[in-house]
Image: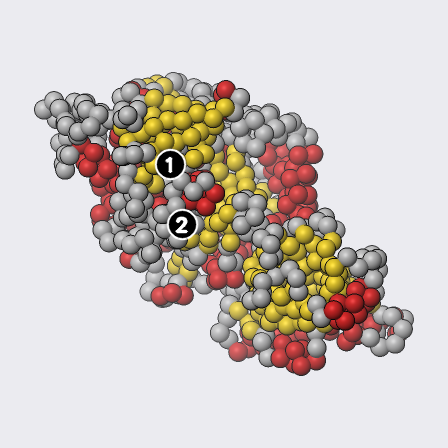
Amino acid sequence: MAPTYDALVIGTGFGGAVAACRLAQAGLSVRVLERGLRYPKGSFPRDWSNPFNGWLWQYGQGLFDIKLLPGMSIVQSAGYGGGSLIYANVHLRPPPETFESDWPEGYSRAALDPYYDLVAYMLDLQPITASARGLPTKAKRMREAARQLGREKQFFYPDLAVRFAPSGEPLPNKFGVAQEGCNYCGECDIGCNVRAKNTLDLNYLAVAEQRGAEMTTQAEATRIEPLSPEGYRVTFTDHAAGGVARTVDARRVFLCAGTVNTTELLLRCRDAHGTLPRISDRLGHRYSANGDFLAFAFDTRDTWDPSEGPTITTSFVVDEGQGRDKTWFLFQEGGHPGQAAGFLQVIDLLGRDVRVPSDLLQKELVRALRSRAGTTSAIEKQRGRFQAVFLAMGRDRSNGRLALSPLSKDLELRWDVPANLALYRTQEQLCQDIARALGARTVYNPLWDRLHIPVSVHNLGGCAMAEEPAYGVLTPEGEVHGHPGLYVLDGAALPASTGVNPSSTIAAVAERNVELAIREALGHPAWTAPERAGTPTGRSAVEPFRASMRMSMEVAPTRVVPREDPMRSVVIPEGGTVLSPTPVVGLRFTERMRGFITSAHVPETDFQGAEEEGKAEGHVAEFTVTITLPNLDRFLAEKARTGIAQGTLHVHGFTPPGGAKVERGVFNLFVDTDSYYERRMLYLLPFTGLDGRQYLLDGFKHVRDDDGFDMWGDTSTLYTVIRRGEDREAPVVATGIIRLGMPDFLQQLTTFTVLGTSSPLAKANALRRFGNMFMGNLWDVFARTKLE
């Protein structure tokens, strides 16, 4: 039995919308599955008193799908139009050098430019300077700050997918869909209720429907399996029918569910369902957060007015270093709706509250925002006029990995923060410089500040294109290696970070690859999108089992023309852009500790008894971790004094013989207690156990002045709890003591490395400042009481 459809498209973001549009224009029978809802004009959620009323995917299939994974905070959209519903409208093309490494043969800026031009035509791109309303306040402030910092030659206005026509006047766009002009309400990133954003449902998807594509919303794809002799069967959950499972068959499947969801679906098909067992071992590898970085500035000298205008209107380039050490990123001003002012102030307060344990910070942040919903006062809204949002994105290492947990099959994300610190440090520097120019103070996302967990809204990779399956999941044309007719056309296909807002690149690559897929399906090697000059406008007819094409000989007028790159005016001086006057210096050292633990010892607080029992049993626990302090200035100033811990851990009975990796550990040095004369050093070292479960080494050093001189004992004795779970609320399964021996301490002193500077003087100063802090805390604990 032949498949029902010629093509099935899963997802309606920048890849899925392009695919649906072109496949329908080619005359193929097309079915589209979208897990989210349609959002007609005026229907985006606005209930600020209830975060469950239409906002979150996890509660009633709302607009935002937020995944707080241990290694990354991910923000995605769920709705008809995908990420275009909540993104900040920015469209940019990466510089040509971006495609010189990691990308397959055949990809270059020059090769993709015609497809970028096509995307620009479809989305009607133009910069904020095209608006008759003039520049928003924050755009003017950003331009002035760039001038003050000597970065005016790298400043530019990016292209935006926004309709800058008179507001309040619905008029048909070039595809016959009614839209109004932008009213500068600042609500781009929570869904534009006036339809001034050129979201995908108003162009690409509208054309697809006009050409006969069948759209099914609230349909979440859960399984893909091959059919014989060709085609695929996709199982989906029909949320509109109460969650019933349904299937649809198609000759070709175009998977465009978004980077994370696409990769997760293929991982489940390979590793859980077993329906696609031949997918490359590289599935999940080469994940990139696109160098995303989020920060805020509070109490600006002059009004910033974050709720005025589109979310992002300006940008400038930072370009430092050479070769592999090159740091390249964009800095953009951001905005938010006026009602969100109080939320940002809650984030500020929570981030500074050291009483909130680091491992529970994600839960506390969600709890605080829920309790705060709907209570924003007029005073907070006024204060909100003096707070800014900073957004950066750049070329990270693209060295993350998405995978399923061996036991629970939950999605995991492994992200190597230390390997990307050069980028993050420079982004932090610039945030501080801009805030200083605005007369404000810098505040970071608390999950970054305390746990060094970035937030990404531009997830890429996981199903990277490569010539061979040993290096990637897809062919350079976007087809899954070894699975004819199964394509990935969204951000998951990109093999490296773009360094710029990636929407245009995702769409351009999708345009390129769906064009190739259509040519193969139709047996028509010259087929191209009707909007491109000199192409036939008639609709093709495709018979079920052979690709034949009947098209009228009418030729469309020229519509797509080359568009100038908004970054054409950017000037990068020889040697790179101006360096920050306040470089961010970090510190790194390695610590090795060894001791004994035992299971089920009671009471749990009898650490010494557990140590003795574990020693008699020979149950050794040890670890070697490298602790990184990304920003020494902030580390010394903050109360939590947080560092990143990575390394290897061995716990008898819980880890494999070779040990377990610690990839996202947290270290806190000299955390204040209720007593001025006590401090604690905290270690949170998560690992995957021998049984595939998640465990946590939860340890503390109790630094206090007991009888006698016990400074060495306090700073070298780690009271240790092993928990089955991922935070301090998880059940205890073993206890004991791990100690730092004198030989290991002497070795540790040789491992101290200063990061972010090559100056011997700056390195010596960093070590001196760290040493002063360390010895100062010991003085306060052990000596001050004796002198008072």
Nearer-the-camera pick, 642 or 416: 416
On residue 645, the disc is none
Q: Is residue 314 in view? A: no
Q: Which residue is mark 1?
A: 225
Describe residue 484's horizontal placement relative to residue 293 as left or right.
Answer: left
Describe residue 158's horizontal placement relative to residue 598 as left or right.
Answer: left
Nearer-the-camera pick, 58 or 199: 58
Nearer-the-camera pick, 251 or 665: 251
**Res 590 → quadrant:** bottom right
**Res 225 → quadrant:** top left
Examine the rendered structure and indicate whether residue 1 appears above or below residue 86: above
Q: In x, y percent, where is residue 591? A: 63, 71
Examine the rendered structure and indicate whether residue 418 appears above or below residue 511: below
Q: Is residue 417 in view? A: yes
Quadrant of the image for the C terminus? Answer: bottom right
Q: Amino acid at mark 1?
A: Glu
Q: Which residue is mark 2?
A: 283
Q: In x, y percent, where is residue 669? A: 69, 64
In the image as oriented, which residue stretches furthest toward the left?
A: 553
